[in-house]
Image: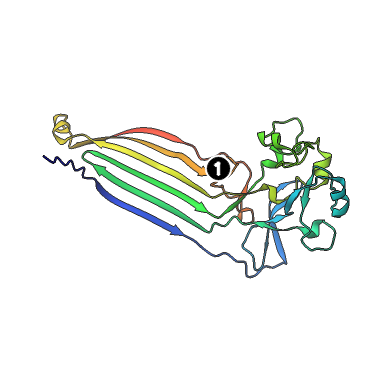
Amino acid sequence: MLIRQVLVFHMASIDLIFSSYDNEVTQLASDFQVGGGFRNGNNATRTEVGRPISSFYGRQVIGIFQTQAEVDASGQTGAGVGRFRYADVDKDGDVDDDDRTFIGSPHADFTYGLNLNAGFKGFDISAFFSGSQGNDAFNVLKIYTDFPSFVDLNRSTRVLNSWTSENTGAELPALSAGAASSGNNETNSNSYYVEDASYFRLKNLQIGYTLPSNFSSKLAMDNARIYVQGTNLFTITDYNGADPEIQESGTLGLGVDYGKFPQSRILSVGFKFNF
């Protein structure tokens, strides 16, 4: 005897939406405009003709100086053993402000949303996912947590991977009390602060159950439904900031993350009755 059990699901809808755009500045009243100000008059973005608006602009970190010989041969102002090494973009033998370049973009290759609705018997479920791919963020908080901008305040655990003569493959330059890092422009705009801010997030999930009609009719109701709902339940991202879904700070500061409060995770229970 063959017994076959068939579960029939009612799929109301699956909606997948992609969105993308091209962004290029075609005309400005001046050669360029800066924005994304973050510290001591420094700016994180530069907008000029032929580039996307609010592109990240600064020095390109290419490593950490390992020896005094490397420092002596670099032509870099403020250089030192254990300090960030920057690219000589214009190839003139000196590493200075003229070697600042475009180091990232806040504009995503595409954004997307996925909406699912399904039901089985009296149960129903709806879920909405959203995300973006290919956009960068300028993580301003790293200036304060990874460098001695305020020496006596808390630091990120990332400083545990700072350069020493025994840890030459470190992510961060050598710990200092301030002078070494500031003299080497490490707390000015550079590529260390630019991170991939792509993300995939469950924005909303709702699971409900509609009571059988014979039960709800005994309560003098046409129908009754109970549900649980969660908002911002999880986010998949490599971004180190509090929230990759950056709250914008003006047209010329797109993607600059000043550490605003992240979107809240909310859990709720609801009842819906019709008489």
Q: Indicate the position of residue 137 as horizontal and vertical percent values.
A: 61, 50
Q: Which image quadrant for residue 99? A: bottom right
In the visual, does 159 lie left or right of 88? left
Q: Compare residues 70 and 256 and report the one nearer the observer.
A: 70
Q: Indicate the position of residue 97 as horizontal and vertical percent values.
A: 80, 57
Callout 1 amino acid:
Asp
Q: Compare residues 185 and 150 and report the one nearer the observer.
A: 185
Q: Indicate the position of residue 198 as horizontal and vertical percent values.
A: 54, 50
Q: Residue furthest bottom?
A: 26
Q: Which image quadrant for residue 3? A: top left
Q: Indicate the position of residue 154 as horizontal and vertical percent values.
A: 69, 31
Q: Compare residues 241 and 35 and report the one nearer the observer.
A: 241
Name the quadrant of the N terminus. top left
Name the quadrant of the C terminus. top left
In the visual, does 112 lie left or right of 28? left
In the visual, does 156 lie left or right of 180? left
Q: Residue furthest left?
A: 1
Q: Could you tell me how many numbered marks the image carries?
A: 1
Q: Compare residues 208 and 26 and report the one nearer the observer.
A: 208
* Colour scheme shown: rainbow
Residue at (30%, 52%) from the top-left corner? 13
Residue at (56%, 44%) from the top-left corner? 238
Q: Which residue is mark 1?
A: 243
In the visual, does 192 lie left or right of 16? right
Residue at (32%, 38%) from the top-left corner? 207
* SS at badge 1: loop
Q: Residues within 10 Å of mark 1 (few under 14, many from 20)?
A: some
